[in-house]
Image (cartoon, rainbow, N blue to C red):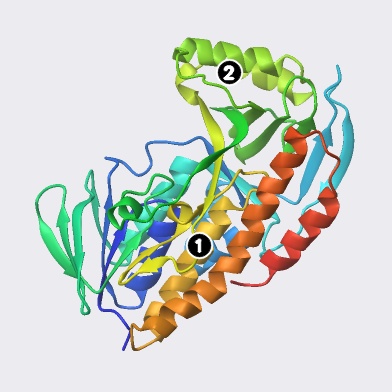
Amino acid sequence: MPAVNSVLVVGGGLAGAATAIHLARAGVAVDLVEIKPDVAALGSGITLQGNALRELRSLGVWDQVQAAGYAFDVTGIRAPDPHGTVVAEVPDAKTGGPDLPAAMGMPRPELARILADRATEVGVKIRLGTTHSDLRQDEHGVDVTFSDHSTGRYDVVVGADGIRSWTRRALGVNLETTSVGMGIWRAFGPRPEAVTRTDLYYGGPSYIAGYCPTGEDSLYAYIVEAAQDRSALTPDEQLAVMKELSQAYHGPWDEIRESLTDPSRVNYTWFETHLLDEPWNRGRVVLIGDAAHTCPPTIAQGGAMALEDAVVLAELLVERDVLDQDLWDTFAARRFERVRTVVDASNALARWQLDHVQGDIPSLMRSIAQLTSQPA
């Protein structure tokens, strides 16, 4: 018998959906609540490394992900010169194994839809536009009051509700989320034929200008600058700023820039970071994904870490027959140091750029590839 019979998952992103799917497939009754009215409503694109693809395959959605995304095995490095000259082509480590691509780009809303459909297929009960308003736990379970005034009782509550986690606040967990010092412009648009992988441009007026194909007909492009307050800009002004910043970058960027015409497909956010010290549970409520750890996407491991949290947590809840402190200690032992290494490496790459320091990027990337090539 699994250690749990009923679980509430709060948050329908990667960590939440994956946890719900794994548990429901094992026969656990799972409710998933998501405060947004549509889990696939927001976002541009996402880059998934091989270890993320490995976990998506374990969820039974690899065929759909493969069909919807765009796979590649090499990252290009280009110069911020008038021709966008390719200065290096770096083979990406196949951290998910030799039978999976090294990396894949895909639209975030499409990935969210695939996971939500899979969750429904395996019996997860999904409620949108809803979250919890009160959590009260005892030694046997957690009583939950929802924002629509309904109630429920669960063996475990999983808080997978993102960087600003309401579950974390409800538990009284103090965690400082800090700005890394960089802001990122992102835009979603059509893919030029010349874009068949991620290319990164270092230097020029911004720290990084890059793009990632997300499908046969789509990509997301991004420019990383020093963090600024851009909140007063209208959507049209945001589009104009991103296009102006992109003027320094050429090659495929010339075609990408011309295709950026829809202000609603441009957004600006800051790189932020936090890492919750172990343990990540408070009694029968546990935090995973961005609710527990987040970092700049400098090595594109955020999604993978969220998916790994989900598979490890679900495995323990299903394979153990008792929900005791040893289970939570084992979860922390399998996740905390691995996640901390990734968060520290991501922040180090950002700091090197901010400080104009020539760090040992190849060595750092090799160490992360070696770590993430081993299943969580």
- Single out the mark in the foreground, 2 or 1: 1
Three-letter code, disc 1: Asp
- Residue positioned 45% across, 44% down in the render: 110
Callout 2 amino acid: Leu
* Residue, far right: 87
Counting residues from the start of the chain, the first of labels 2 and 1 encountered is 2
Residue in the picture at 75% in, 66% down: 370
Residue 342, placed above or below residue 333: above
Q: Residues within 10 Å of mark 1 (few under 14, many from 20)?
A: few
Question: Label 2: which residue?
Answer: 260
Is label 1 in a helix, a strand or a loop?
loop
Q: Give the numbered dot on residue 277.
A: 1
Vertical position of residue 107 compared to residue 258: above or below:
below
x, y percent for residue 246: 69, 18
Q: Residue at x 75, y 25 (%)?
A: 252
Place residue 186 in its image quadrant: top right
Of 76 and 8, nearer the camera is 8
Q: In this rendering, is residue 358 above or below 22? A: above
Is residue 49 visible in the rendered image? The answer is no
Quadrant including the N terminus = bottom left
Residue 297 in sight: yes
| Helix, strand or loop status at disc 2 | loop
Camera-nearest residue between 192 and 269: 269
